[in-house]
Amino acid sequence: MTSIDACRPRDRTRFVVRTIAMVALWFLPATGTGTAQNVGPHPYRPGIDVLDYDITLDLPDRGNTIDGRAVLSIRRSAQVDTLVLDLVSLRVDSVLVNSQAVTFTRTDSLIRIPIGRIVGDSFSVAVRYRGDPKDGFIIRTDSTGRWTGFGDNWPNRARNWIPGIDHPSDKATVTWTVRAPSERTIVANGELTEVTPMPSGAGGSARTLTRWRESRPIPLYLMVIAAAPLVYYDLGRAGCGVGEFDGCVRQSVYVYPELRDYLPGPFANAPGIVRLFSELVAPFPYEKLAHLQSSTRYGGMENAGAIFYSDGAFRRRALRPGLIAHETAHQWFGDAVTEREWSHVWLSEGFATYFEKLWVERFAGDSAFKAEMRGIREQIIKAPEVASRPVIDTAQTDLMKLLNTNSYQKGGWTLHMLRALVGDSAFFRGLRSYYLANRHSTALTDDLRRAVEASSGRPLGWFFDQWLRRPGYADVTTSWRFDASQRRVVATITQGARFGAYRFPVTVAVTDASGRERRATIDVPASATATLVLPLDLDAAPRTVVFDPDVRVLGTFTAR
Ligand SMILES: [Zn+2]
């Protein structure tokens, strides 16, 4: 997702502010369900794997009460006697296991279901439930009386309206069946499979059954529906030959009717974005890609096949194309390949951050790309969490605090440096093999490391440890002298003690006495001081020597 660009007093559980000038994010203390859950290396619900959710929701004409039935197809891989499902607050009316009613127990956030007596390792669990979701499914009625409901689950708020295993390690397919007043458009993950008028409800209003099916496994935090009086704008079938399904990717935008004339607006970029990422990585992984005006608390939220953007960005008619690129990149990284543990969320946000910049590089050119990478580097250097915590932050238990400069900007910059280290060819081959090996499944950082080690033929443990498991960045002081006897520049690189010394290649641009620029790359070792000879023959002392002209090292450079 992209971080919050507005604060919404109507959000009941948390109030979040982003100050753009300061870049860093602050989160005020949370109440409710967002905090303190498993981010460590242990399985969330050992021995249990949900394969499919079949969710039926009845939405009200007015008010906040939803009626739900969720049928979970589950595989058990170890002897587990009690199935524990996450569901906050809502009333559970019944639980069936393999169609037999069972006696379950309920806490405010869990359902405990006995499964000790079932035979075999595959079974179904059907949960009937009802109530007003506190969060996760955001119901609002606007000033003109329009009822709207939007799923907004990150990180673990799906449990407020969907009974399930609410952790990114457990991915499943999902069918959504939604019965609602006919004036609402229902959009969800996957492919639209049914729209059927129903007999009128008690209030006499016409109702419609709408069904969507997502046939690729996704985590619960990406399972959403939208239910609002949205109008459809077809972006066409672009990127033909680059889709995982029928070879094309159908894209569309859903907005409130009064925003219809804004379209396609920034979404004119959407086909090119999908084409680029399909070329760089692999075919688009889902049945379609819809972009929606929504009630998400984030700037954008990358729900699989149905990206939700903040209402405010639409109303201001100020939705950035870069935001579309970021959320679209998540369809591959985060959605199709999902971090198995929250502490590895940079595999989602760092990738989306960097792929947004790769789109800039392709469509706006090299100097725009460099300027953006320089801008991100300045944000990283200023961020207090970068100085105090590593990107892979296994000690952080407040998941909202993982949405920080480490996961986004420093994660993206780590990919940028990996690319500089191994070269474009090995970098993109490694990314593709990492993606293809883990597509529709989950991954950890070591999966990426192994893939790029294989594509580059180089051990990279030191690189990943240095940039992702340690706080900080390189603090570099440079000086140089011309050695007339060798006819070469001798560079001295000193690294500050604050974050320790880093190992990195750095390019040096030398403008010789005739005004010609020449470049060389030297390998700086992880030591406090290094003296390195540039492999360039010069007839006389150069006019200037510039370190890291291409913005490829995450550090501060001071010339002495
Ligand atoms: Zn994101």
Image (tube, helix red, strand yellow):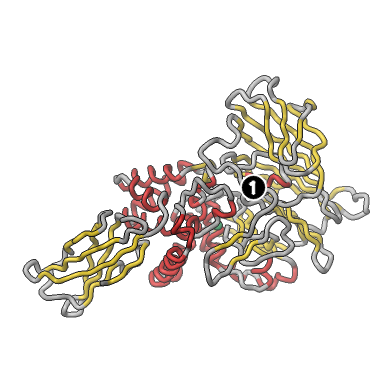
Q: Quadrant of residue 558?
A: bottom left
Residue 212's x, y, as percent?
A: 70, 47
The single residue placed furthest to the left in the displayed view is 485
Question: For the point 81% across and 50% down, which residue is it?
Answer: 59
Number of numbered discs overlaid on the protein picture = 1
Residue 168 horizontal side relative to residue 485, left or right:
right
Relative side of 105 to 205, left or right? left
Residue linked to disc 1: 156
Q: Residue at image x 81%, y 63%?
A: 146
Residues 29 and 272: in front is 29
Residue 191 visible in this rendered orientation of the protein: no
Q: Quadrant of the N terminus?
A: bottom right
Where residue 130 appears, as percent x and y from the top left, is 81, 43
Above or below — where is 528 with respect to 365?
Answer: above
Is residue 382 in view from this perspective? Answer: yes
Quadrant housing the C terminus: bottom left
Compared to residue 141, the image places residue 482 above or below, namely below
Residue 199 in picture, x, y percent from top left: 89, 48
**Residue type (three-letter) at the residue carrying disc 1:** Asn
Query: Which structural element holds mark 1?
Result: loop
Q: Is mark 1 within 8 Å of ligand 1?
A: no
Looking at the rendering, the quadrant in which ligand 1 lies is bottom right
Q: Is residue 311 above or below residue 82?
A: below
The quadrant in which residue 505 appears is bottom left
Q: Is residue 102 above or below residue 28?
A: above
Crowd around label 1: few <14 · some 14–19 · many ≥20 (10 Å): many
